[in-house]
Amino acid sequence: MFKGLVGIVTGGASGLGKATVEQLLKQGGRVVICDLPSSPGADVAKQFGNDTAFVPVDVTSEQDIRNALQTTVDKFGRLDVAVNCAGIATASRIYNFKKEQPFDLKSFQKTIEVNLVGTFNVIRLVAGLIGKNAPNADGQRGVIINTASIAAFDGQIGQAAYSASKAGVVGMTLPVARDLAKQGIRVVTIAPGLFRTPMMDQLPEPAIKQLESSVPFPSRLGQPEEYALLVQSIIQNPMINGETIRLDGSLRMQP
Ligand SMILES: NC(=O)C1=CN([C@@H]2O[C@H](COP(=O)(O)OP(=O)(O)OC[C@H]3O[C@@H](n4cnc5c(N)ncnc54)[C@H](O)[C@@H]3O)[C@@H](O)[C@H]2O)C=CC1
Ligand SMILES: C[C@]12CCC(=O)C=C1CC[C@@H]1[C@@H]2C(=O)C[C@@]2(C)[C@H]1CC[C@]2(O)C(=O)C=O
């Protein structure tokens, strides 16, 4: 279905990103996995075979993303789709009254830097390469897909930094889609609810069980493959643009 399609997936060594890489490959695409040098990205690429490459990147670095784009062109000749999955989860209350300690500013800045600035950095750089493609019959040159979170809308206690970073991703989706509309590049954001990934596995099992029971239907954590299926649908459907799509089993998170 995606024969000839070339994608980049940030955070592609783990969780939602890894499932996306697998789905794009299954559909006949070729994929560059971008993830931290400390990630298992090289092993993952080896496991997936010749239609993948791994480029160690920090999404906040301009030079790292430029290197990834150069590898994409050298190895696969073009870029059609970029999926932003790289992200970190942090949690802290705005003020700890027992310890008389305010939220650590460096931790807030780091969360914004990776989740928001990193996503923006990738979008602004991939747009130049996708824009070089010849348009299809519909005028489309490619698609950029971002990952926010339902925490962008229903931020819980302790999620000020995480929610702010993801709300930033939601907020820039429409203006960036408008910026790139003339070039025929679509921009869409997915806001996942609760998915079973290594990020979620940081939580103790009883906490995960409790979270699962809070999802109305289906009352379980999402599978990374279900996220990847939405990525596939977004790529296939040319009318989806400038929108954030919740993927959450109708969960609205409690305070
Ligand atoms: N798992 C879940 O329930 C949910 C996840 N999300 C978001 O989905 C995205 C993917 O999360 P998961 O797959 O669950 O997490 P994960 O922890 O399994 O994967 C995240 C990947 O991002 C990479 N990464 C982190 N910082 C990076 C950086 N500066 N540069 C490059 N790569 C970096 C990590 O090495 C890791 O491979 C994240 O943005 C997360 O915030 C949103 C809502 C729910
Ligand atoms: C950061 C959290 C909460 C605190 C903790 O002890 C462990 C965590 C790791 C998993 C995170 C937790 C969180 O704040 C909500 C998210 C980020 C969770 C993974 C998915 C998560 O539920 C989310 O993004 C929801 O939208």
Image (spheres, grey):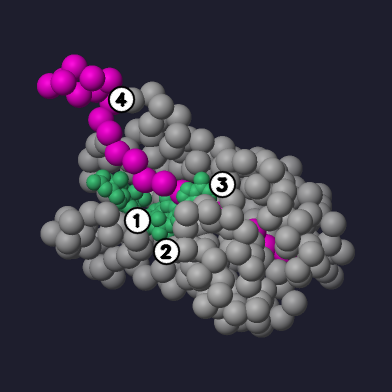
Q: Secondary structure at mark 2?
A: helix
Ligand 1 within 8 Å of disc 2? The answer is: yes
Q: Residue at x 33, y 25 (%)?
A: 104
Residue range highlighted in magenta: 79-103
Ligand 1 within 8 Å of disc 1? The answer is: yes
* Mark with earlier residue (2, 1): 2
* Mark with earlier residue (4, 1): 4
Identify the amino acid type marked 4: Phe
Of circles 1 and 3, the one toward us is: 3
Q: Secondary structure at mark 1?
A: loop
Q: Residue at x 52, y 78 (%)?
A: 47
Of circles 3 and 4, the one toward us is: 3
- The answer for how far apart the CA atoms under marks 2 and 3 are is 17 Å
Q: Secondary structure at mark 3?
A: loop
Residue 238: percent from left, percent from top: 68, 66
Image position of 204 with respect to 137: above or below: above
- The answer for how far apart the CA atoms under marks 3 and 4 are is 25 Å
